[in-house]
Image: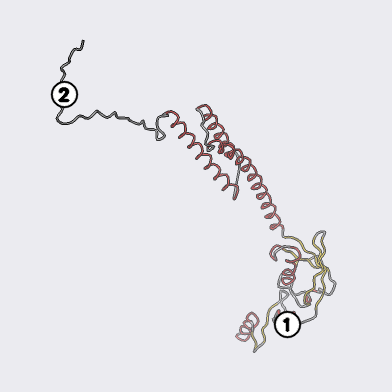
Amino acid sequence: MKRFSSSKRAVNNVVKGEIKWELRPGGMLVQKRDMGDASSGPMIKIKVSHGSFHHDITVPAQSTFGDLKKVLVQETGLEPKEQRLLFQGKEKDDEECLHMVGVKDMSKVVLLEDPASKERKLEEMKRNQSVLKACEEVAKVRAEVNALEGIVHGGTKVDEKELLGLTELLMVQLLQLDTIEANGEAKLQRRAEVRRVQRLVDTLDNMKARNSNPFSSSGKSEAFECASPSFPSSTRITHDWEVFD
């Protein structure tokens, strides 16, 4: 029993002298393969079918399906975890060796995209489209606000009626921004426009306050004092009046 346990440790772990071992999915004990050894061996060409696309991939004959997935990243844009490889109708694990399951030169392998990954990409695409649409709507409001901002800061005198009209137009833009459903970058853009509109409304309120008190730009009335005439200190002031003919 003790002998069996030590042998099991050697199988799971690895080392007998200088030779490393590994246990294959089928239960076979084989010498652990090094990628350097695999690349120095014979090369085979594999025909990989991916939907309507076909890829001819050349890899070392002793590669694993995991190695094949890494090569396919460049061809398909799919990360290894997003790939499912089928050979002779059966999905293969990353650790399985090509030559051990019968993959030879010019063999055919089917590549499928993982359904969960495909669903995530569709959701991401929908989100991106939603963000793009929201950005476009914010851009339309921004153009309207730019025009109104030009009037507010144009340097020309604006009467009370025009101030009220501009304020109403800005409030309309605020309502328009509030109706935009935005996430990510679009949400940041919408928030920036809301703050800009609010600053313009504050500016208009200050202009209305100045117009209501035209005597001072600061909103406070200015006081003017008249100076009294000065007389020499020796002069005596009386209220006696002299009648002239």
Q: What is the x, y in percent for residue 148?
A: 57, 36
Q: In which quarter of the image is residue 72?
A: bottom right
SS category of the residue bearing label 1: helix
Please name the residue shown 50% across and 27% down the image.
160
Query: Could you tell me the amino acid type at mark 1?
Result: Asp
Please name the residue shown 82% across and 59% down the image.
52
Residue 91, relative to residue 214: is it above or below? Answer: below
Q: Residues within 10 Å of mark 1 (few under 14, many from 20)?
A: few
Q: In this view, does 61 lie to the left or right of 138?
A: right
Q: Quadrant of residue 31?
A: bottom right
Q: Which colour scheme is used?
A: secondary structure
Query: Could you tell me the amino acid type at mark 2?
Result: Ile
Residue 147, relative to residue 114: is it above or below? Answer: above
Which one is in front, 211 or 234?
A: 234
Q: Residue 237 carries which label?
A: 2
Which one is in front, 209 or 39?
A: 209
Q: What is the x, y in percent for residue 123?
A: 67, 51
Please name the residue shown 42% across and 29% down the image.
214
Quarter holding the N terminus is: bottom right
Residue 134, relative to residue 58: is it above or below? Answer: above
Q: What is the x, y in percent for residue 77?
A: 73, 62
Residue pointed to by mark 1: 37
